[in-house]
Amino acid sequence: MADDSSSPKATGKELRDDSCSNGDALVLKPKKMKAKEKSLQSGKAKTHKKSLKSSEYENRLLFAINIMKTSKKESMDFEDSGDRRVQLDVKEELKEDPDFVVQGKGKKRKRKTDHRDGPSSTSEAPLPKKKKKVVKEEGQMNLGTEKKKKNEVKVKVKKEEGDRPVSVKKKKSKEEIEAARALKLKKKEEEEKQRWRWWEEEKYEHGIKWKFLEHKGPYFPPEYQPLPDDVKFYYNGKAVKLNPPAEEGALYFAQMLDHEYTTKEVFRNNFFRDWRKDMTLEEKQLIKDLNKCDFGELLVMHKQRVEARKNMSKEEKQVIKEANQKIVEEYGFCVLDQHRERIGNFKIEPPALFRGRGDHPKQGMLKKRIQPEDVIINCSKDSYIPEPPAGHRWKEVRHDNTVTWLASWTENVQGSCKYVMLNANSKLKGEKDWEKYEVARRLKLCVDAIRAQYLEDLKSKQMGTRQRAVAFYFIDKLALRAGNEKEEGETADTVGCCSLRVEHITLHDTLDGEKCVVEFDFLGKDCIRYYNKVPVIKRVFKNLKLFMEKKQGGDDLFDRLNTQLLNKHLSSLMAGLTAKVFRTYNASITLQQQLQKLTNKTDNVAEKLLSYNRANRAVAILCNHQRAPPKTFDQSMANLQAKIDSRKEQLALAKKELKQAKKDSKGSSDNKLLASVYHSRRLQRAIYFFSQHLYISDVSLIAVCVFSLVDKKKKAVQRCEEQLLRMEVQATDKEENKQIALSTSKLNYLDPRISVAWCKNIEVPLDKIYNKTLRDKFAWAIDMTENDFVF
């Protein structure tokens, strides 16, 4: 707002010139013109006001105030969507107004400017019809040229983007948004009606998982298609035509050339060894060095195919989507006890190169193509038995209702069994989760007695009992996995508590001011490194020294203990108790304790979510759920910080405008008060309309406008502060989760009823904690959990 326009001494003409720079502002009336205008309007206004009852006048004034108070968005032009709300209410009346020109549907409405010398009043006689027409045509011409310029800019942008089509999202109307919201709500209600509420039914007898199971079997990936004739593989500079299996393996390696895996010696050696198994005798004699192989043309072809998929038209993508949907409808569902259930992984993995996690010793090995002859089918006797692909047969067909898998096979890299299972939100998965957390809850009742028992066993005269007690102590306090015995060379050198070796721990009498510190350093599950320095009680520390006497680094720390012996002892203490149950118990109880400690009911939603994530993070650290920092982390944080800085500038500007609005509202001059709201076009139009058509007094209008302006500025400051706080909380949360995986514990170790009860008590929407997949998975917990649930 210009200084001259806000000054009490500013003349009416100066105010008019300043405000009408855009050609559409309200014309202020100079003091000298007031007498003339009153003489022109007095008869009309007085007559009309006399005919109005006092209640009707008050209603019109309240209507004006509501319009002001509900205006949520200020706009600097008349194309703003907020202006259209006022336009809808007064459209018919404004058509008759000579001071406004309607330039067709959807076009902006301009106030005609008076080009005569000297100030003028809005109530003076209108221009002649010819002049009015000329002004209208000029406005249309200006509007047309503006639209042309905008179209030219859009065309230029599209050309600069390249051949890739640029999608322009059409802004949805209020009716369309409401219709979409209603449709989404209706769909949600239908899903809820169709949901199988299995947790309300009686359970089958122990060991029985289902009574009827029918499905179509797994879906096999398409067969390999040979390379085009113009794409060649080269060895030592010469083109070589490979047989289809070897050519397929070469393509898999070429697809990973841009990845760091192909630079690792282990990966390259494992691939080359497996690849030679698919070569003919002639190819083996020729190709003896991977470094002389040229996969360049195969990589180029792969990139072209990827780019072609990205550049598909909407129609082409729709065709593929419909084809995939047909596959899902045929193979992605089964009938379980007369209910239609979704299958989780109904597609058999296509052949590829094995990657593994971390520095896996088998990375680079070729995963073979699975054939129907490798697959075992499981279904009920009275069901339709799925047919294998033409020319093939199943390895075996079983009817075992004590297991939950639908099909199984053994993969060639690690020799492990793979299964086709039901989706995470199915009855079989839900029952398993529910039972797991109930066993963990039962542990809470006897955990003190169990801990007292293993502390007593630390002093046992039998070495095996002492080792079991120390291992139990680590599983309880550090949530270590028990570990399973593995054949040498079969998988990566990963260990658990029972399979720790002497080289994996280091004892410190004193470290960083702590006494009796044990330093752990080993590869856990999925080759994730576990590194921790933990102070322990003296009895455990002395026993560890005893266990390590006269042993080399490669010797077992617990040489008289294994996982089977440990779990056998645990099951004798409580039915169903295993080392994994202890891990689940410690994770869930830690979450509950941390939520009670960190949560503040007076915080806003963003701060409550930060508290939840910090509690979840404590569990993830306890369970060693780590991850590598995302590649885009630094860029993502930089973008977020830029948004925070921008929001801080907006907040400072909003506070400055609020201060100015409060200052202007204390002035005594009517002109000054009206000038203080001049930057709000919507207020200008409302003032004009109410004064011309509702005949509300200037004093009332001034009071309403000033009140509305200050109120809106306060809301703008509040909105900026909330958005800034939300962004800062997001940045803090993101930084703290840089190398921590929160989803693993949330999915597998945390009783969902803790989170559901917390959301209900703290009034946080559940979808802020659980996405739709997790809400479907834990539907049983969401339905049965009360506010007073305690793990």
Image (spheres, rainbow, N blue to C red):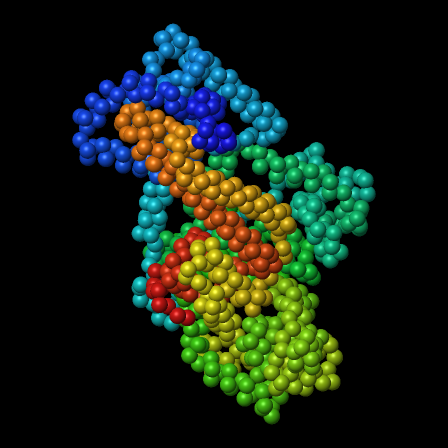
Seen in the picture, residue 382 relative to 166 is either above or below; the reply is below
Farthest residue in the bottom direction? Answer: 461
766 and 411: which is toward the camera: 766
* Picture coordinates of residue 314, whole percent (x, y): 50, 33
| Residue drawn 61% across the image and 30% down it | 161
Residue 57 x %, y %: 22, 32
Where does the image place residue 543, in percent across and percent down from the top left? Answer: 64, 85
58 is higher (above) or lower (below) than 584:
above
* Residue 545 visible: yes
Q: Residue at x 40, y 20 (%)?
A: 111
Where is residue 529, by image quadrant? bottom right
Residues 189 and 695: in front is 695
| Quadrant occupied by the C terminus | bottom left
Which residue is depicted at the point 67% across and 70% down?
521
Residue farthest along the right direction in this orientation: 236
Residue 101 higher or lower than 215, as above or below:
above
Residue 774 in view here: no
From the top left corner, tell me how far across and down residue 597 is, in percent.
Answer: 47, 68
Name the image quarter holding residue 171: top left
**Does residue 95 lie above or below 562 as drawn?**
above
